[in-house]
Image (spheres, coloured by chain):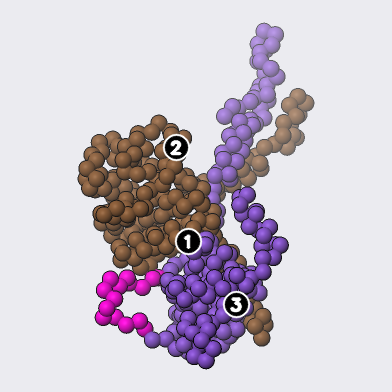
Chain colours: A purple, B brown
């Protein structure tokens, strides 16, 4: 850093010595240059929002399936979601032909928007959702004072104790993007679904999916979307 | 300032406050910065409401690009003295009967994610720059299984052997096919990794109680 002593431009005229007039200014321009350079560099390279992760737990793979029976589930509680082509198709119960009509259950198509599959899930999971919502609201308002750990523990317990909510089985068709899978798992988290699993699609369900897709009118918007996707 | 009589020559701007501010900001950025790690592929992760942070150490990262290629990353363990990466490369090299020189092992330690088949690993490590490396990793890590298992399976297997504490994280592009992700999840399950992370972006979603009433 240079120190400029403004003494009037060097020795003039035979060096008549004067007492120094000093103003001890430090020239900060180079320093500022350097600082702003570094600052810009750090501002541009820094990554503020670290990516987050969503944890999923899958069951152990069973190599030897002979001795192990599939767990019995209450048929009325099961909600099946089949994701395919950016849509979520859902139906209740089991993929078995009806006793009277001998027909497979019909699929209902929904999308991933706020009024799509989320509404279905919320309606089915109303009790638990409201319970958890009340609890979190009270924590937020400060009526219940708990450390974060025990809040999480309490939420887990709510989910464990819940008997009213659905058991959601998530299945994927042939044309599924990874983003859709994350979306649907995320919906489970949003709707506070206590029990869900990712399972393989059965042949009956493939059949049902094909019928449902054939019934679906190809809307102009969907066509456009498809075209856009191809361009992308 | 200038109560002293000064020659009116230098109309200097007082930069002290500016310098103060700059040094403050600079210090802040220097301390908070964490460099974006350069990755072999650009991956646009889907978003979720999950707020769990990505672990920094002991992670096996499996990247899936939007054209369904798989890339692999593994960190050096809790501290860089554990040399997990070179240990892994040595181990997998022994398995595929490719020997790596100490220089190559050292170099590999400082590199990041990769997507090359084992046969091209040596070229990839010794490549002069990133462009050549990107050229080599056009196909990603082979996932098709042979009789003894795919290379990806081997990487995951040996990564778990080298660092038993390592967790798996799948960082997939939202446009990648579910089938590829499923394949990877199957491999992880086979290796008894039943709990793993899906890397996502944070997104805020609010559902009010009145929405369902």
Q: Nearer the viewer, residue A136 or A172?
A: A172
Dot 3 crowding, Cα within 10 Å, few <14, some 14–19, many 20+: some
- Asked if badge 1 and badge 2 are on a common chain, one would say yes
As drawn, B209 above or below B148: below
Where residue A108 is drawn, which disc sits there?
3
Q: Residues within 10 Å of mark 1 (few under 14, many from 20)?
A: many
Question: Closer to us: mark 3 or mark 2?
Answer: 3
User: Given this view, does label 1 or label 2 mark the residue nearer the observer?
Assistant: 1
* Secondary structure type for disc 2: helix
The kind of secondary structure element at disc 1 is: helix
x, y percent for residue A207? 50, 73
Report in which chain the residue with disc 2 lies. Answer: B
Query: At x 37% / y 37%, what residue is drawn?
Result: B124
Q: Is residue B167 left or right of B43 when viewed as pictured?
A: left
Q: Within the magenta stretch, is there residue A41?
A: no
Q: Where is residue B115 in the image (x, y as percent from the top left)?
A: 40, 46
Mark identifier at residue B178: 1
Q: How many marks?
A: 3
Mark on residue B56? none
Q: Is residue B124 above or below residue A107?
A: above
Q: In which quadrant is the N terminus of chain B drawn?
A: top right
The CA distance from mark 1 to mark 2 is: 26 Å
The percent position of residue B143, horizontal first and vertical second, equals 37, 53
The alpha-carbon separation of the residues under discs 1 and 3 comes to 22 Å
Observer-side mark, 1 or 3, equals 3
Q: Give the range drawn in magenta.
A: A57-71
Check residue A67 for magenta coloring: yes
Measure how far apart labels 3 and 2 are at the Cα level: 46 Å
Checking the image for residue B135, the label placed there is: 2
Q: Is the magenta stretch mostly helix, strand or loop?
A: loop
Vertical relation: B57 (above or below) A37: below
Disc 3 element: strand
């Amino acid at each position: 850093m240079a120190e400029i002593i403004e003494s009037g431009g060097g020795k003039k005229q035979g060096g008549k010595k004067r007492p120094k007039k000093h103003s001890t200014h430090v020239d900060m321009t180079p320093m500022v240059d350097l600082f702003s350079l570094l600052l810009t560099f750090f501002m541009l390279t820094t990554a503020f929002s670290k990516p987050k992760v969503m944890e999923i737990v899958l069951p152990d793979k069973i190599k030897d399936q002979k001795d192990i029976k599939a767990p019995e589930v209450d048929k009325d509680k099961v909600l099946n979601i089949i994701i395919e082509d950016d849509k979520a198709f859902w139906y209740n119960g089991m993929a078995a032909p009806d006793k009277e009509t001998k027909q497979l259950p019909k699929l209902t198509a929904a999308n991933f928007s706020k009024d799509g599959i989320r509404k279905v899930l919320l309606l089915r999971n109303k009790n638990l959702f409201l319970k958890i919502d009340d609890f979190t609201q009270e924590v937020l308002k400060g009526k219940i004072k708990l450390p974060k750990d025990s809040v999480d523990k309490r939420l887990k317990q709510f989910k464990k104790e819940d008997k009213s909510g659905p058991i959601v089985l998530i299945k994927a068709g042939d044309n599924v993007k990874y983003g859709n899978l994350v979306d649907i798992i995320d919906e489970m988290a949003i709707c506070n679904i206590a029990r869900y699993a990712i399972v393989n699609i059965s042949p009956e369900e493939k059949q049902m999916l094909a019928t449902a897709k054939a019934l679906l009118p190809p809307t102009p918007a969907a066509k456009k979307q498809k075209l856009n996707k191809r361009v992308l | 300032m200038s109560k002293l009589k000064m020659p009116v020559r230098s109309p200097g701007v007082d930069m002290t406050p500016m310098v103060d501010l700059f040094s403050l900001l600079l210090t802040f950025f220097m301390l908070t910065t964490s460099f974006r790690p350069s990755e072999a592929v650009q991956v646009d992760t889907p978003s979720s409401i999950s707020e769990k942070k990505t672990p920094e150490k002991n992670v096996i990262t499996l990247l899936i690009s939007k054209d369904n290629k798989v890339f692999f990353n593994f960190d050096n363990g809790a501290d860089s003295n554990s040399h997990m990466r070179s240990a892994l490369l040595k181990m997998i090299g022994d398995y595929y009967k490719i020997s790596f020189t100490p220089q190559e092992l050292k170099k590999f330690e400082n590199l990041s994610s990769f997507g090359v088949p084992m046969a091209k690993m040596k070229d990839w490590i010794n490549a002069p720059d990133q462009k050549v490396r990107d050229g080599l990793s056009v196909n990603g890590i082979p996932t098709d299984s042979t009789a003894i298992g795919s290379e990806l399976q081997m990487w995951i297997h040996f990564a778990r052997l080298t660092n038993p504490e390592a967790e798996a994280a799948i960082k997939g592009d939202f446009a990648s096919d579910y089938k590829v992700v499923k394949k990877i999840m199957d491999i992880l399950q086979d290796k008894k990794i039943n709990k793993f992370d899906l890397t996502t972006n944070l997104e805020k979603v609010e559902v009010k109680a009145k929405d369902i009433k």
